Image (tube, rainbow, N blue to C red):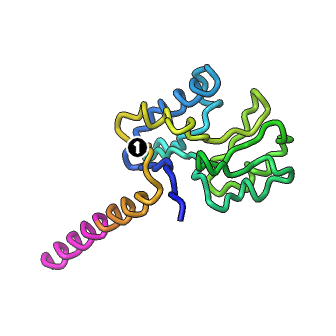
Amino acid sequence: MEPAGKVLMIDHEKCTGCRLCELVCAVKHDGVSNPMRSRIRVMKWEQEGLYIPMSCQQCQDAPCMNGCPVNAISHNETLNRIEVDYDICIGCRTCVSVCPFGAMNFNTIDRKVIKCDLCDGDPQCVRFCDIKAVDYVDAGDVSIMKKKEAAHRLFAANKKAAALQTTM
C-alpha cells in the first residue's frame, strides 16, 4: 500500500478571518496581493464570528476530475495532488460546479479555473498562518486528530450534562 501523502488540515475554530492565507497564496502563484487570485478562500460569517478557510481536499475520487469533459484534471501520483492541465482545459467550469467543497474557483481576471496545488509541497498558507488554522499534515494523521477533537468535545458535553444533573 502506497503512502497517503500530506494534505491541508483546516481548523476553522482557530481561524481569525485575517485572510493572510489568501494574500500569500495569490502572491505565491500570481505575484499580486489579490484575494480573487487565491486558491484558498476564507468564508466569513461576521455576525457569528465564524471564519472557515476552504481549500481543495485533494479527493481520492475527485468529482472535479470525474466531471471534466476533456480530462484536463488528473491525479499526480508523485505529488499526491489533483491538478489542472491548462493546455487541455476549455474553461467550461464544470469542475467548479461539481466540487462539493467549493474549492475549485474561476479566476475572472485570467479566465481560468484555479485550485490548490499545495505549493508543490510547501504550502505558503500554512507557512504564514501563525495560529495554525491551516496545517500541512500526513493524511493518515487527520483522522486521528479529528477523533481526538471529537472525544474532547464529547467529554466536555458529558461533563456539562453531569453537572446539570447534580444541580436538579
Dominant secondary structure (helix, strand or loop) of the stretch shown in magenta:
helix
Q: Is residue 40 left or right of residue 149?
A: right
Residue 49 in percent (x, y) is at 42, 44
Residue nearest the viewer, comparing 32 with 85: 85
Q: Residue at x 41, y 42 (%)?
A: 15
Q: Is residue 13 left or right of residue 121?
A: left
Is residue 155 magenta-colored? yes
Displayed quadrant of residue 109: top right
Is the residue 148 above or below the residue 162 in the image? Answer: above
Where does the C terminus fall, quadrant-wise? bottom left
Residue 155 in percent (x, y) is at 25, 69
Q: Residue at x 85, y 53 (%)?
A: 69
Q: Residue at x 30, y 70 (%)?
A: 154
Q: Residue at x 54, y 43 (%)?
A: 43
The 10 Å Cα crowd at callout 1, few under 14, some 14 to 19, many 20 or more, is: many
Residue 29 in percent (x, y) is at 62, 28
Read off the magenta span. 152-168
Residue bearing mark 1: 133
Residue 126 in percent (x, y) is at 44, 37
Outermost left residue: 166
- What amino acid is found at the position of numbered circle 1 in the picture? Ala
